[in-house]
Structure formats: C-alpha cells, structure tokens
Amino acid sequence: MCCLASISYSTVCLLFKKMKLTCLVVALCFGVGVMAGKYSRDVNEPKSSDGQKLEFRIAKLDQVWNKANRMQLSPVRQSELHSDLKIQEKDELQWKKLKVEGLDENGEKEAQLRRNFNVILAKYGMDGKRDTRSLESNHLKDHDIKEGDTFEDPRLDKLWNKAKSSGKFSSEEMMSLKREFQHHKDKTHEYNILMDTISRTEEEIHKNEISALEGDTKEHVLHQKHSDLKQKMSDLNQGFERLRKISREGFSTDSEFREPRVIELWEAAKRANLSDNELDSLKEELRHFETKVEKHSHYQEQLELSHQKLQHVESLGDKEHIKRNQEKYNTIAEKTREMGYKMKKHMQDLSNKISREGLEHNEL
C-alpha cells in the first residue's frame, strides 16, 4: 500500500513537471507572437485617425501626396513627386535625430530642408501661387513663348532646330540629344523655382513677417543659399555650352555616357580635381548608375502606356477587364516609384560624394 502510494506520488510529480513545462512553452510562444505583432510591418506602418494606411510618416508630406492625388497629375509626374517626397522624408527624419543630438545648432540643415520642401511644392504646382516662373533666365526676359516652341527657351529651340536639320545625328542619337535638351529645360525650371523661393523668403525676412530663426537670417546661412544658386547657374551655363558643342559637332565617338543625369555627374567629377584612379572608380560606378536610370526610364514608359490602356478599358465599362488592368497599372506604378526613389537617392549620394572628394582635394 505504502509502495503504491509512493508510486502514485512520483507519477503525480512527474505529470506536474510536464504540465509546468508545457505551460512555459505555450507562454513563450504567446509572448513571441505578441512581440512579432508589436513589431510587424502592419502594426508599425503609420495610419490616419480613421485607421487608413498613410503613405508617409510625416504628416505634411502625406497631405501633399493626398493633394497630388486629387490634382490628378500624370502617372509619371506623380511617380516623380513620390520619389521627391520620399527623399524629403528620409532627410527630415535624419535631421530630427541630429536635432535631438544637438548637431544642428545654427539651424542650417533645417533651413535647407525647408527650402527643399518649398521647391517641391512649387515644382509640382502646389505652393498656392500661379506659376509665373516660365523657363526664363536673365537672357530670356523679352522672350514670348510661341506655339510650336519645343523647350520654351529661344536659345534651346534654336540649337534643337539646327541639330535636327544638320543631318549629323541618327534617330537614336536624336532621342539621346532630346533627353539632354529636356533635362536642361528641367534644370532651368528648378533653378528659377529655387531662386523665386529664396527671394520670397528674404522678402518676408525684410518685412519682419517671420521670426529670425524661421527666416534663416543668420549670415552664413544666407551666404550658403546664394552660393548654391551661383553653383547651379554655373552648372546650367556649362550644360548649355555642352549642348551647343554637341549641336555643332555631333556626339563624339568616345562619349562615356548617354543619360543626361549621368553625363552631368561625370562632367562635375572631371571638374572636381580627382585623381585618375578615383575617376576610373567613379566611372565604373556611374556605368552601374546609368543602367539604373535607363531601367527607370523604361518603367516610366510602361507606366504611361499602362495608364493609357486602363483609360481605354474604363471607357468600355467591362468591370472584370478594368479590375485586371487596374491591378497591372498599380503594380507598375509601385515598381516605378520604388525605382525612382532608389535612382534619385543614388544620384544624391553620387553628387555628395563628388562634391566632398573634390573639396578634400582642393583643401590639400
């Protein structure tokens, strides 16, 4: 009897231990599940007050994106805006960390971010102002845009027409040349927007309409803004001279690159006083970047075609057909935005690298 009681007690103890172990495992699994839920993408993605997923973590950027959707920008234009806002978001989140660490005491980085944001608003027609910044520089004040003008700049139109009638360019070269002309036009537009943004900021400062900090009144910040403008104007002048030379002489047989953005970076690198080894290394990196730019351009073309097809299908009214084309369009749009962000971020990194290394050489 005593032995039977002893066996029964041992068995009970063993069962109790197994039950404790099982409970511990269940608790651990439950805890891991909770933690996974806590840190999952779905839980941590920003949401609005009504539970809808936000496109951007910073409220003002999300508001701009929503406004752009209501404006019904073209698919490619909307994709470009998305990339610009993503870059702005990344820079602003990095700045917030710097501010917490006390690394932007003079407010220079904050001022730069504010200017960049204002340029984005103006660039996509969301600054609440009628865009009077036609593509005009100091050379173009008396120019009236005529119907049929290709680049809204008489100098560019004259060069373009001369190139077209010269017979020096193949159809492929004409496409490359047109991309360079369009890129120069866009750069001029951005320059004028930046100049207008800075002018309005300084006007507000003089009228004491905003605080000293908000107005970036510190002398070194103002000096930096005008240095940026001066550099951009110098880049524009060099770009125009390049277009003039190509239009007159044609593409050289030893042209390193085809894409305007890449050509611009390469020309800047050659002016940066880098060593031959550094230039060779950068040239290889720019070749990879050019592949990325070309791939993004291809997706932009596919996005535009997909949008046109979707509009056609919508006019026919077949719901199932519309759904399939909408899903395809959404997929291409998402891929184009993703590639656009990576391409612009890569370009920003390359530009910073060229500027930094050039500055280091000049200081030696």
Image: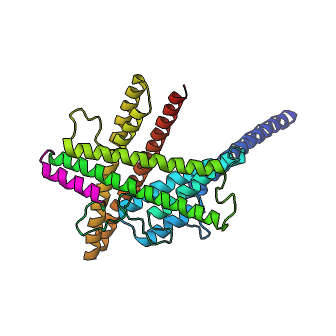
Q: Quadrant of the N terminus?
A: top right
Image spot of residue 273 (x, y percent)? 44, 29
Q: Is residue 40 visible?
A: no
Query: Is 184 on the left or on the right of 359, as rendered?
Result: left
User: Which residue is more in the foreground, 355 or 313?
Assistant: 355
User: How many marks can you see?
Assistant: 0
Please name the residue shown 48% across and 48% down the image.
230
Image spot of residue 245 (x, y percent)? 25, 43
User: Which residue is more in the foreground, 325 or 234?
Assistant: 234
Please name the residue shown 38% across and 65% down the image.
134
Residue 157 image-quadrant placement: bottom left
User: Which residue is more in the foreground, 263 or 48?
Assistant: 263
The chief SS type of the magenta part is: helix
Q: Quadrant of the C terminus?
A: top right
Above or below, 308 relative to 29:
below
Residue 165 lies in magenta, yes or no? yes
Above or below, 173 relative to 146:
above
Residue 257 image-quadrant placement: top left
Residue 243 lies in magenta, yes or no? no
Query: Given the current orientation, which residue lies at the most extreme right position?
Result: 2
Residue bounds of the magenta highlight = 153-168
Q: Is residue 212 visible?
A: yes
Please name the residue shown 18% across and 46% down the image.
172
Query: Is 199 on the left or on the right of 188, as rendered?
Result: right
Above or below, 247 relative to 211:
above
Please name the residue shown 41% across and 38% down the image.
268
Query: Is 166 on the left or on the right of 357, as rendered?
Result: left
Way the structure is coloured: rainbow
User: Which residue is more in the foreground, 252 or 362?
Assistant: 362
Image spot of residue 345 (x, y percent)? 47, 45
Image spot of residue 286 (x, y percent)? 37, 36
